[in-house]
Image: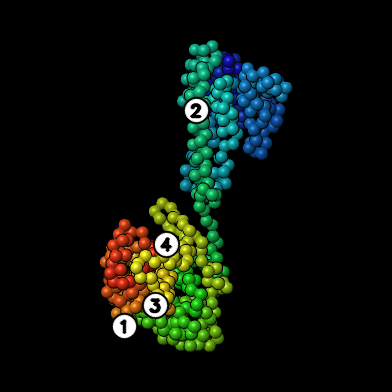
Amino acid sequence: MKISRALISVSDKTGVASFARALERQGVDIISTGGTADLLRKEKIPVREISSFTAFPEVLEGRVKTLHPRVHGGLLYKRGNPKHEAEARECGFEPIDLVVVNLYPFEATIAKPDVTLAEAIENIDIGGPSMIRSAAKNYESVTVVIDPADYDLVLENMRDNNGETTLKLRERLAIKAFIKTSEYDRAIGNFLNREQTTEASFSISLPLVMRLRYGENPHQAAALYGDFDRHFEKLHGKELSFNNILDISAATNLIGEFEEPTVAILKHTNPCGVGSDADLRKAWDKAFATDKQAPFGGIIICNRPLGESLAKAVSEIFSEVIVAPDFEPEGRSILQKKKNLRLIRLVSSETSGTRSTRDIRSVCGGVLVQDADTANGASQNAVTKRRPTKTELNAMLFGWRVVKHVKSNAIVYAKGDRTLGIGAGQMSRVDASRIAIWKAEEAGLSLKGSAVASDAFFPFPDGLIAAADAGATCAIQPGGSVRDEEVIAAANERNMAMIFTGVRHFRH
């Protein structure tokens, strides 16, 4: 069919006046909008405003002008289809045979370094993609042009075909149009994924809690955001530092593993020692005995109100922070004698209530987001000939709860109520084991009859053999190594009991 009516509405006006003039000379009725119509009129090209074509004004600052049944009806009705033809006449749809549209410059807008979300949203074209898609869907009858580079091609095709375009050209232009609209939508989606939260994106906006003196090091600026102050109340001491806050978070996650009365000591987010006892002072003694050097300048946490007896014990060493669900008056009075010691009360009724469900890490070019490692308990899948005794099982489970919070590679030697040696952050698992053994020797603690817990599988038997040589009689680890059978054989040769949990606790 000969092109008799065109709708032209472009943001990129390159060559549009010349194209429209050539169409007008071929007797094409031109409908246009806004700035495009103004330009064509200045060029003395007859043009009808879209509002006169639809008999409806442009409204909402131009947001609604081509979203009208007369526009889309004129594009979409099937030429030659009796039912469509009849409905088009009844509704007053005039055929639109050619659509010339390019879109608001969304990508150019968001490329500006100071672009705002509001500015970006205003440059999301709605009517343009709608017209393009309507025309492209009905390409059997309608020609759609989205690229000024195609103007001459269309004019040449019309001249060669008595004012018509060929089906082959219309099909090519329709495919090009759909590709363009999909790229346009993808650009919008990618931008909004960075700016707003959707199922396909991650976005975070948190209120400022406080600006910190500095970050991990004095040359780094830092601030705390979120609702940290809803979970923790500072009762005494200096302002919290960046590192204090990291340690408090790590300590809270660790103590949340224990229901029984427990004391833990941490340094640089790693446990130095953990002990459990109905008497909190004895729990402290067990934790402190693990390593009496590392806790200097560390953080102490307990899961019961801190009283006078424990306060006297912990006041004998230098600590940065002490965290407890409450401080009894006598205990608080003792600790407040240290001017700079920070006393932090866990406001949440349960320590587990303070633990985040998301773990967020910054990386080059973005952030990594994962579910927090909240896997609790351990499978009691004994893989050795000898099953663990009840005492051994308790020791393994205690060590397993602690090793989860030690930087990988991590090894913990434990009894059922205390840690005996901790090896953290080593490049090889056997080195982590050696450090844990050395730490126990330095503390004067025997590993005879202990349990060894490993955050990930033993890749070779050497780590397990080192533990056996040190006195461990049982081991708990995830399993899953290609050499599991060799490790199991090494355990059987030494009459060790071993459990595979099926759960790994890497902590980078």
**Is any part of residue 92 visible from this angle?**
no
Q: Is residue 296 left or right of residue 228?
A: left
Q: Nearer the viewer, residue 29 or 164?
A: 164
Type of amino acid at the residue the image marks with label 2:
Ile
Label 1 or label 3, whichever comes before in sequence order: 3
Type of amino acid at the residue the image marks with label 1:
Gly
Type of amino acid at the residue the image marks with label 4:
Val
Residue 27: x percent and y percent? Answer: 59, 15
Q: Label 4 to label 3, Cα distance in Å?
A: 21 Å
Q: Name the mark on residue 444.
A: 1
Residue drawn 28% across and 62% down? 486
Colour mapping used in the image: rainbow
Type of amino acid at the residue the image marks with label 3:
Lys
Residue 191: x percent and y percent? Answer: 50, 45
Are there few (<14), some (14-19), or many (20+) residues within 10 Å of tag 2? some
493 w.r.t. 288: above or below: above
Secondary structure found at label 4: loop
**Marks 3 and 1: in contact by CB < 8 Å?**
no
Depth check, mark 1 against mark 3: the one in front is: 3
Residue 22: x percent and y percent? Answer: 54, 17
Q: Name the mark on residue 415.
A: 3
Question: Which residue carries the number 2 mark?
Answer: 175
Residue lying at the far front of the rendered structure: 385
Depth check, mark 2 against mark 1: the one in front is: 1
Label 2 or label 1, whichever comes before in sequence order: 2
Q: Label 2 to label 1, Cα distance in Å?
A: 77 Å
The image quarter containing residue 270 is bottom left
The image quarter containing residue 98 is top right
Q: Label 2 to label 4, Cα distance in Å?
A: 50 Å
Residue drawn 48% across and 71% down? 257
